[in-house]
Image: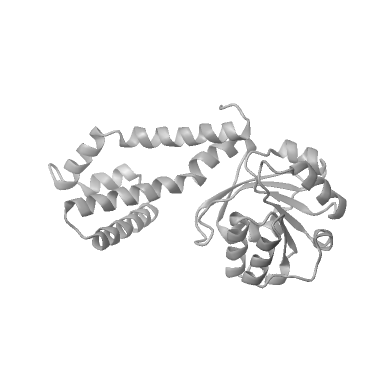
């Protein structure tokens, strides 16, 4: 694999590094780090046995890919100037900074620079979940994809959909966790132990997803199969239909999308 330099060594950068190492897409010697917190760099270098021989300038010069993971409120302009001074013009920038557009990144790093704008998912350790990715025409996808896919699946998007993807897909795991917690509580309320209820919910969730994939049926078709006339299941669904469940979930997604556009300084579509 190519040399990858991380500028910003926060939690998401560490999650990406851990997943790529665990899946053997990267070796420890392929990775270098830079961060304003020297203790953070020392911690990650020791934890993952990363390269300690190169200075920041040497690491930038050697990098094929530069993962930009600084905070949106940091001096991105200054960071970009530093990178442009020492990095190869062919080095690909992979930005995981929320709200920073390709237009701005191209203005900072030059119109000919290969640039990737990425919204990573938070399921990096599982290899599941989608990260949203936008590429400039200068990017060569083939050598890059193994790295991007080492911490989840990749969905290539038009940039206009990035805010929607962030509010729906990346934040979406919250709704799954919330659903699992609520359904587990229902089992406990009905009389099962917490352990029993949680085990049932996990298996039903995994089994339902597997059934959808195996059958290639719409969820409504599987619900119809699962419910007999005047039976237990249809009575439960009747109460759920009388609640605000579906609309509340959809409002939650739209609120997350709106907040994403606000943070990015964009106007909602």
Residue depicted at x 71% and y 39%: 102
Residue at point 85%, 51% (across, down): 89
Residue 159 placed where, x, y %?
A: 64, 38
Could you tell whether 84 is left or right of 29 in the image?
right
Identify whether 175 is placed above or below 36.
above
For residue 191, what is the image quadrant? bottom left
Residue 136 image offset from top left, x and y in percent: 73, 43
- Out of 147 and 195, give the one closest to the viewer: 195
Which image quadrant is residue 147 in? bottom right
Which residue is nearer to you in this view: 239 or 224? Answer: 239
x and y percent of residue 123 in the render? 50, 56
Whether 167 is drawn above or below 34: the answer is above
Left or right: residue 132 compared with residue 77: left
* Residue that protrudes farthest toward the left in the picture: 230
Q: Residue at x 54, y 58 (%)?
A: 124
Question: Quadrant location of residue 230?
Answer: top left
Is 160 left or right of 202, judged from the image as shown? right
**On screen, 104 above or below 267?**
below
Q: How is the image coloured?
A: one colour
């Amino acid at each position: 694999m190519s040399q990858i330099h991380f500028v910003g060594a926060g939690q998401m950068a560490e999650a990406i590094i851990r997943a790529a190492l665990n899946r053997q897409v990267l070796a420890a010697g392929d990775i270098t780090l830079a961060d304003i917190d020297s203790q953070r760099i020392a911690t990650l270098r020791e934890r993952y046995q990363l390269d300690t021989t190169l200075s920041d300038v040497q690491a930038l010069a050697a990098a094929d890919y530069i993962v930009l993971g600084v905070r949106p409120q940091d001096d991105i302009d200054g960071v970009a100037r530093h990178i442009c001074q020492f990095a190869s013009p062919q080095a690909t920038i992979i930005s995981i900074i929320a709200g920073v557009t390709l237009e701005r990144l191209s203005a900072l790093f030059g119109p000919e620079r290969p640039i990737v704008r990425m919204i990573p998912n938070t399921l990096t350790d599982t290899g599941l979940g989608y990260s949203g990715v936008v590429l400039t025409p200068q990017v060569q996808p083939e050598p890059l994809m193994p790295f991007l896919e080492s911490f989840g699946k990749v969905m290539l998007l038009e940039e206009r959909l990035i805010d929607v993807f962030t509010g729906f897909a990346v934040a979406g795991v919250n709704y799954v966790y919330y659903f699992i917690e609520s359904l587990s509580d229902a089992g406990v309320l009905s009389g099962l132990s917490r352990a029993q209820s949680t085990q049932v919910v996990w298996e039903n969730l995994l089994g339902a997803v597997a059934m959808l994939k195996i059958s290639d049926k719409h969820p409504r078709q599987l619900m119809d199969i699962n419910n007999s006339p005047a039976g237990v299941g249809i009575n439960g669904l009747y109460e759920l239909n009388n609640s605000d469940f579906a609309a509340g979930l959809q409002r939650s997604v739209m609120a997350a999308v709106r907040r994403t556009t606000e943070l990015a300084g964009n106007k909602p579509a």
